[in-house]
Image (cartoon, helix red, strand yellow):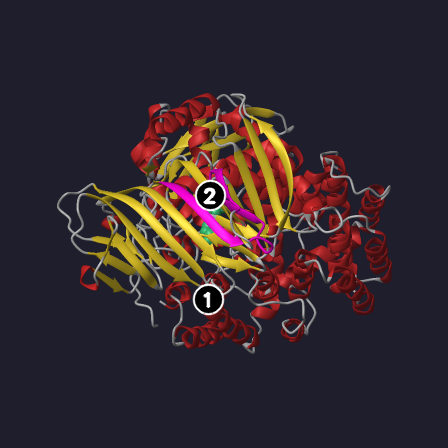
Amino acid sequence: MNTEVKAKYLKDYKKPAYAIESVDLLFELFEEETFVTNTMQIKKTDASVNDLTLDAVNLELLELSLNDLKLQESRYIIEEEKLTVLNVPDAFEIKIKNKIYPQDNTELEGLYKSGDIFCTQNEPEGFRSITPFLDRPDIMSLFTTTILADKKKYPVLLSNGNKIKCHEDFKERHGVTWHDPHPKPSYLFALVAGNLGSISDEFTTIQGNKVALNIYCDLGNEQKCHHAMHSLKASMKWDEEKYGRAYDLDIYNIVAVDSFNMGAMENKGLNIFNSAYVLADTDTATDANFMGIESVIAHEYFHNWTGNRITCRDWFQLTLKEGLTVFRDQCFSADMNSAQVQRIEDVKALRERQFVEDASPTRHPIQPESYISMNNFYTATVYEKGAEVIRMVYTLLGEKNYRQAMDLYFETFDGQAVTTDDFLWAMHECGDFDLELFKRWYKQSGTPRLHVKESFENGTYSILLTQKIPDDVDGKKQKPCYYPLKMGLLDRDGSEILAKTLIISKESETFVFENLKEKPVLSINRDFSVPIIVEYGEAQFAFLMKYDTNSFTQYEATQNFALRTISEIIESSAINDDFVDAYGHLLDLDVDLSYKALLLELPSVSAVMQLQKEIDFDAIYDAQDKLLLHIAQKYKEKLLDIYKQNHLPASASLEAKYIAKRAIKNRALKILSILKNDEVAELAQKQYEESLTMTDRIVALDVLENLHVSYAEVALQDFYNRYKDETLVMNKYFAILASSSRYDVLERVEKLQRDKVYDEKVPNLVRSLVGSFARNHKHFHAKDGSGYKFLADKIIEIDKINPQIASGLCGAFKVCDKMNKHNQDLIKKELSRVISTQGLSKNSFEIIDKILK
Ligand code: 0A1
Ligand code: ZN
């Protein structure tokens, strides 16, 4: 390690000793370099300090003056990542000019170039690589930004807030000045310069203010921005209706760029997006992509109030804005689409990613206590588990009180940088729950379990609920949790006897239900009201699959029954006929087809793996295939019927009804593909050729890839030729090949890296090819260690280009301590090699160090 590895701790938080009241920035953009001139009005807020220490990374200082006087070198010190100005007065102006090289910035933090577009990413700590600053979220300042650049190459010049001036007085260059009237932390600063296409629209707020809406993209992609625009307007309306929050500037700009480390960024008035979350048409984007765009557009918009107007005091509070904003975008998507499908999809995603993280050496509370690289904490835990915690608050308060509490939160803390305790204070003011016990959700890691023991005697039914709380990552004991547990009781005919929300507050507690004629059937953790694992040995899965009135627990029963069946196959090879029969009933259910498509999906490898003490991927794949084959053979005709009924008439419509038809028929096709026969191969081939949507085409391609080598070759070639100029579609192509079950995957992945479409500097492409391979358990965990060696080599290589993407790839090794000894040794050997690489980033170091400990 070259970089000094130092952790930061929440307990060390200190209030800043200065306020930066205003910042005036001048950017002079050139092809080789950029000059930044930063003029700040600063005031001491702690009279006892003398020196001002600003954050500054790779500082190339050109000028430094204080109150218009150039500072001698003896008046300041430049150390690694800091600029200290000695003996400053109580109030002063400081002016700093420095030089940066956005063209060479492959880390994609600070100011960088995505193709020909200048853009920024400053959360969490990118601003300090642009110009020296107190780069922490509790420093909120007024920003004025002037951008000067070549007129032809960069006709569009954007920053936060409102455009206040155009500078046209030079020949080949021009400029624009922007002013943001809302004080904000530096992480929300943004700048864009490029030759961009755009679409525009308008929104009138509930107060009657007109807001100009613009979405910018590469020239030629304008027609793919309409769904994003539609989603933006829907989000603006929803936030007014549901939270009483209106937009607060005259203009809202969104820019889509191809090289972006994450999904998108909520910079005030100027969101910058990974183009994957903006661009879509039915020929290039799947139904899931359309939904993803709707939710990310909403997420970034909702941040305007939960994140921007009220921001985080420090980065340990990240879940304050992220958990809350994810909860808000989940509710929005539920309102726009099918609420039951949305809830299941959200829980599925949580369990696939967050539960795995929470059982790994990188587990952490939603409010971590320390970090080495903050970039490593944009995790499923902080985001998705964080959203579940807010959802529990919502359940505890009820809709009306929650709204009141949110109003109070906005009224009290608008314009401030606050903590999760401040948020919980507002919630507690309007609700009745045990605040201190509830706070444990913020401080403890790991997925809690709840053991259920039933008994029935003389008309009295009782459940003894016992919490099992995992130790923290250092082996320390943690305490029982406090939460709302939604449940219901059904009688033997399947009618509901009662539905209730229990408050769980103790380690062990019995709940009693009297005057019952017979032992009822328990439906527990309805709507997934708490993010835990329920251990419920005697559950009547088949019964609940048939009768549960709660769509989530009906789905859950199906999943749990399937999981139990797969576990039994792993143990004894025998297939439980009761499950197969119950599955057969699902095929006949007359329910929403999107929901039905979810019901028919068997648990993922990740879901099965979470049940194993020592993970055995081969055994999981074999058992899954065996069960699926049995189902496909037994219900072949029904599945074919479902396919045919929903396949035609062909339509590319994005109406819910057609999305649902595509979902169910593609589910049927995927199940049937396990039969590996010509009939199914021909169906898939035909679907590929005739498809009107990317949804249908990509499923058919995936099925062919795993089913029929020669049909696949033709389709893959066709797909490549058709879409080789569409990077977003090529991501799908790489992902299919890297996730394939074919034996020669690694060889093909290695070859694809040399394809002219592939570019290791573009995060989306790395995630699609290398990331998908790392999730292809069958090949990644190959006994000869070839998968591990490949990924370790890639991490070393990519770490030099983009540490954030490299450390993301390290996550694939998180399951290390649950693997067999042979694989563990192979992983440790590779990770030891990576961690001892000269100059490894602190990002990758932090993750690998935790895995190796
Ligand atoms: N705040 C953004 C996510 C984001 C975080 C970090 C980034 O770069 C290090 C980029 C984006 C969101 O929640 O959407
Ligand atoms: Zn966010």
**Residue at horizontal 30%, vertical 67%?**
4
Whether residue 432 sits left or right of residue 265 in the image: it is left
Span colored in magenta:
142-168
Principal SS element in the magenta part?
Answer: strand
Q: Please indicate, yes or no, whether residue 551 appears anywhere in the rendered image.
A: no
2 and 1 marks in contact (CB < 8 Å): no
In the picture, the disc for residue 38 is: none
**Residue at horizontal 74%, vertical 54%?**
699
The secondary element bearing badge 2 is classed as strand
Magenta stretch: residue 123 in it?
no
Q: Nearer the viewer, residue 225 or 363?
A: 225
What is the three-letter code of the residue carrying label 2?
A: Thr
Q: Please indicate, yes or no, whether residue 595 appears anywhere in the rendered image.
A: yes
Vertical placement of residue 638 versus 77, above or below: above
Q: What residue is disc 1 on? A: 816
Q: Pointer 1: residues within 10 angstroms few (<14), some, or many (20+)?
A: many
* Picture quadrant where residue 16 is located: top left
Q: Which quarter shows the C terminus?
A: bottom left
Q: What residue is disc 2 on? A: 177
Vertical placement of residue 9 versus 333, above or below: below
Image spot of residue 687 (x, y percent): 83, 53
Image spot of residue 434 (x, y percent): 32, 31
Image spot of residue 602 (x, y percent): 65, 51
Image spot of residue 171 (x, y percent): 55, 53
Which circle's residue, 2 or 1, is located before the other in the chain? 2
What is the three-letter code of the residue carrying label 1?
A: Cys
